Image (cartoon, grey):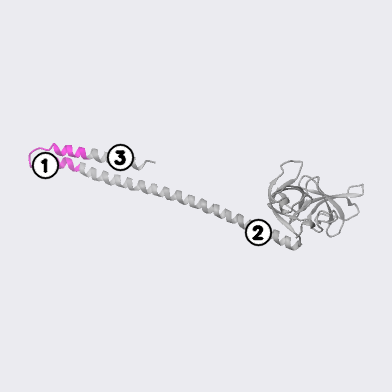
Amino acid sequence: MFSRRMVLVVAVLVLLLLNIAALTVSSSRLDSAGGAAQIALHLTAPFQKGISSTLGWVRSIWTGYFKLVSTAEENEALRLEVATLREQLNGYNELKLLDGRMRSLLSFKEAKARNMVAAEVTGKDASPWYRTLIIDKGTDDGVAKGQPVVVPDGIVGQVIEASHRYAKVLLVTDRNSSVDALVQDTRSRGVLKGGGAGECHFAYANRNDTITAGQRIVSSGLDGVFPKGFFIGTVSKVNKGVAGIFQEVVVTPSVTFEKLEEVLVVMSPETDN
């Protein structure tokens, strides 16, 4: 796009050349007051007409050019304004979602009538051997090793390390995790162990107990770690096999660990207010 200075210079040069040509023709007229004047008028008239037309053309080009420049500037300003408004809307939506999650955590905490500390998930272990996450609450907030970590959907895991400001949580899907558990409706006992691949196993379930897909597994409270009655997952597959005293039960966790953003740490009795 041409600059304003360049367009101005070109227009001035064109006008200057046309005027010089007209003046040259006019100055060469004959001294005769009759036919010479007519000849001069006949010769200069087309140039004057050309100058007028050229001036109109340059004026229209000049006006159109600056209209385009002005429109482009307005479009750019509008584009930036729309981008800003979209960013603000996205921020409002994030705050709305956060408010919904925090209200859910608060309602769950009140329903359980327990002292719990809300924490934000700040990191996850990328190791294929361990299933852990990092939260932004530590010993300064009363968080200690061995405390359960939950959300309204169910049990997340257990605190295994804690510093002043952060703590590491071992997920129930980790192979090193175990929770004493029950089939909620039949009260069949077992131990929920992590499967390491996004699933769990309800181990030591008696082969004679009737366990079917769709039944809910909850914590029994007998391990001294996880409070009684917290939801853990749903039975997805059962295999009694042909021998042995236990049956194989696969459980799908109730918590979607990949989407966790906030959790609740259940305080130990000695830290309760």
Instruction: Identify the disc placed on residue 100.
Output: 2
Q: Residue at x 70, y 58 (%)?
A: 105
Q: Considering the numbered disc 1 on the image, is that residue within a helix, a strand or a loop?
A: helix
User: What's the distance in space between the residues labelled 2 and 1, CA to CA?
Assistant: 93 Å
Mark whose residue sits in front, 2 or 1: 2
Three-letter code for the amino acid on which mark 3 is drawn: Val
Q: Considering the numbered disc 2 on the image, is that residue within a helix, a strand or a loop?
A: helix
Residue 179 placement (x, y as % from top left): 82, 51
Q: Nearer the viewer, residue 237 or 137?
A: 137
Magenta-highlighted residues: 19-46
Mark whose residue sits in front, 2 or 3: 2
Sequence order check, earlier mark of 2 and 1: 1
Dot 2 alpha-carbon crowd within 10 angstroms: few under 14, some 14 to 19, many 20 or more? few
Q: Nearer the viewer, residue 74 or 28?
A: 74
Provide the residue designation for mark 3. 9
Three-letter code for the amino acid on which mark 2 is drawn: Gly
